[in-house]
Amino acid sequence: MGDGINYAFGRLFGETLIRRERFVDRDRLARACALLDRYGGIMIALPRFILLFRAIVPFTAGSLGMKQTTYGAAPGAERGER
């Protein structure tokens, strides 16, 4: 449930934060977008085991416009599996 809320915050507020240059480096944003396009489901499922990424990836996925169906289809993304 927490990851889903984090994803929703990314969908709602992420674009605003992305537009502000001081919060996001454009090169890193492009790399993150390319990683999500290429490894979508894996990039959502893998952070379940890496604590730092677990807090960042759902917000980033929502900010970059990953479809909710793709996000929810990733193993363990919405079910809170541990």
Image: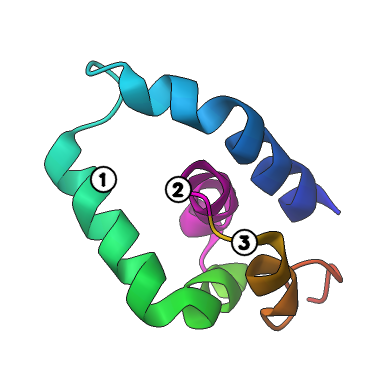
Element on which disc 3 rests: loop
37 or 7: nearer the viewer: 37
Image quadrant holding the N terminus, namely bottom right
Q: Pointer 1: residues within 10 angstroms few (<14), some, or many (20+)?
A: some
What is the magenta segment's predominant secondary structure? helix
Q: Which residues are magenta?
A: 50-65
76 or 9: nearer the viewer: 9
Question: Is residue 33 toward the left or the right of residue 67 in the image?
Answer: left
In the rendered image, which quarter is residue 21 located in?
A: top left
Residue under label 1, please give it: 29
Amino acid on which the number 3 mark rests in the picture: Lys
The x and y percentages for residue 43 are 47, 73
Question: Is residue 34 toward the left or the right of residue 65 in the image?
Answer: left
Q: Label 2, label 1: how many angstroms apart (C-alpha)? A: 9 Å
Element on which disc 1 rests: helix
Amino acid on which the number 2 mark rests in the picture: Leu
Q: Label 3, label 2: how many angstroms apart (C-alpha)? A: 9 Å
Residue under label 2, please give it: 64
Question: Is residue 32 toward the left or the right of residue 51 in the image?
Answer: left
Element on which disc 2 rests: loop
Labels 2 & 1 near each other (Cβ < 8 A): yes
Sequence-first tag of 3 and 1: 1
Is 5 above or below relative to 44? Answer: above
- Identify the disc placed on residue 67: 3
The residue drawn where x is 42% and y is 22% is 17
Q: Pointer 3: residues within 10 angstroms few (<14), some, or many (20+)?
A: few
* Residue 6 is a magenta residue: no
Question: Is residue 11 toward the left or the right of residue 64 in the image?
Answer: right
* Residue 52 is a magenta residue: yes
